[in-house]
Every structure is written in C-alpha cells, then in structure tokens.
Image (cartoon, rainbow, N blue to C red):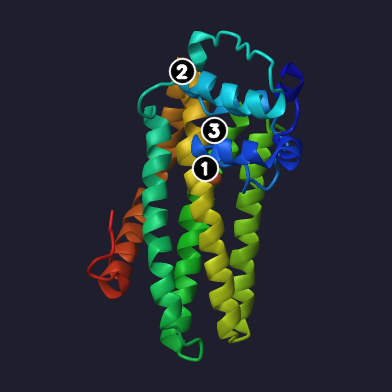
Amino acid sequence: MNEYLRTPIRDIIARFPEVGSLLEMHGIGCVPCSLGTCALGDIVDIHGLAPEVELDLMTAIGAVVAPGEAVVLSARPAASSPKKGFSPPMKTLVDEHRLILRVIALVPAITASLDVHLEADRRLVAAIVDFIRNYADRFHHAKEEDLLFSLFDRESDILKVMYEDHANGRARVKATVDALERRDQAGVTENLTGYIGILSQHIRKEDDILYPWMDRKLSTRQVGELFSAFRKLDSEFSEKADRYGAFVRSLEDKYASNDAEVA
Ligand SMILES: [Fe+2]
Ligand SMILES: [Fe+2]
C-alpha cells in the first residue's frame, strides 16, 4: 500500500478505475484533471480531509489496490488539519471569482442571440473580452500568479494544472478575438463556450481545493503580507473594478433570465 502512496494517481486509476470513483465520491476530481501526476499520498494531503474521512477513503482504496494489507496513516501535523473559512486575502480572490462567474453564467444566453454581422453585437463580444482580459486575467490572475502562487513551488503538480488552465483560457480568448475579426459566428461561440468551460472548472478547483490547501500552508505572516499587497492592487484598480461591476449588472439586466441565479 505504501508504494501506491507515492504512485501518480493517473497510473493508479489506469490500473484500478474503481479508485477514480472512490475519489469522486469524496469530492476529489482526479479523473478529469489534465495532468494526473500527483501522487496518491499528496492528493489526500492537498484535500485536507477530516481524519476519519481520510481513513475511510484510504481503507476503501487499500481494499482495491492492496487487498488484505492494513492501511497505516501517519499523523498529520497540526498545520495540515482542516480550517474553517478563508483567510482575508483568499476571501478577496473568492469574491473576484463570484463576479467572473456572473459573466460566465450569461455567456450561453449572449451567444444564443449573437449576430457577429451586427456592429452592436461585435462591440458586446469585445466588451466581454475586455472584462476577461483586464478583470479576470490582468487583475485576478496576476494576483494569483505574481503574488499567491509565487509563495509555493511553481513546479508542483497542482500549480502546473492552474498555470495550464490560465494559458488555455488565454488561448481561447485570443481565438475568440480572431474569430470575431473574421466575422466567424461559430468560431466566436465555440471559443467563448470553451473559455467558460475552462474557467468554471478552474474556479471550482481553486475554491474547493487549491485555496483551502494554500490557506492551510501559509504562515500568519504570509497571509498578512498577501492581504496588504492585494489591498494595494485593489485600491489602484478600484475605479476599473466599479466600472466592471456596473458592466456585469448591465449584462444581467439584459441577459439574465428571471429564474437565473444571480449572486
Ligand atoms: Fe486561477
Ligand atoms: Fe482564480
């Protein structure tokens, strides 16, 4: 069993597909992960499961990969135990996700009625691209990449997935702009839809897995330094943030259906 704790999850799931289902049942989405190179032992640590849940999961996995062997878990250090709620800087990033998700929620309705041969519709797509590039990417992703992620090992499997998602998102936005210039209706819809697929999954990974794990690892001093660095960026961006907030509200007024959930 110990040998499996150091084995990449991709290899374990390829050999024992049932392990993928067991992880999914515990809210650990390794099956759709694009890399799958994290070791089984690291995955359990990253997700910060309660000790009894961790034992339950590892016993079930052990019964599949090494039947008859006892599962022995080493005690986790106190810093790895689950914490309730986000630290103030992480909460800021989660709040930014909420605004991005409000735009993502409207994209299906926007693309359904889009006509790229109309000047007004082309301006609308350009405004959404501007929001994505300036708010989601230059403001929010820059906080992640330049400040938060730089406190961790950039070569770690979990961060490689996050950088890869950011890069794939940027490629989809560039493809959207290219399609718009060609007046390629299907290309705009396909790439904007691809973008929201990447970003919604990415945000779920950050909110549910990455940020809680980072919060458990950050020292109190690092949390304080991040908070003040974020606050400086927030104050520099505050005018634009107000403008983007108003832009999202105007989109919702036009495209949110009555029963749509608006955060
Ligand atoms: Fe991110
Ligand atoms: Fe994010």
In the image: residue 152, left or right of residue 207:
right
Mark identifier at residue 205: 1
Quarter of the image where the N terminus is located: top right
Spatial CA span between label 1 and label 2: 23 Å
Residue drawn 62% across the image and 59% down it = 170
* Disc nearest the viewer among 2 and 3: 2
Spatial CA span between label 2 and label 3: 30 Å
Q: Position of residue 197 (x, y in %)?
A: 53, 60
Instruction: Give the residue type that dot 1 points to.
Output: Lys
Label 2 residue SS: helix
Instruction: Give the residue type that dot 3 points to.
Output: Leu
Label 1 residue SS: helix
Residue drawn 61% across the image and 51% down it = 166
Instruction: Give the residue type that dot 2 points to.
Output: Glu
Q: Residue furthest bottom?
A: 117
Label 3 residue SS: helix
In the image: residue 154, left or right of residue 117:
right
* Disc nearest the viewer among 1 and 2: 2
Q: Position of residue 98 (x, y in %)?
A: 37, 50
In the image: residue 188, left or right of residue 224:
right
- The CB of the residue at mark 3 lies under 8 Å from ligand 1: no
* Disc nearest the viewer among 3 and 1: 1
Instruction: Specify few, some or many for label 2: CA neighbours under 10 Å numbering under 14, 14-19, or 20 or more.
Output: few
Q: Which residue is mark 2?
A: 52
Q: Position of residue 216 (x, y in %)?
A: 49, 21
Residue drawn 65% across the image and 53% down it = 167
Q: Which residue is mark 3?
A: 148
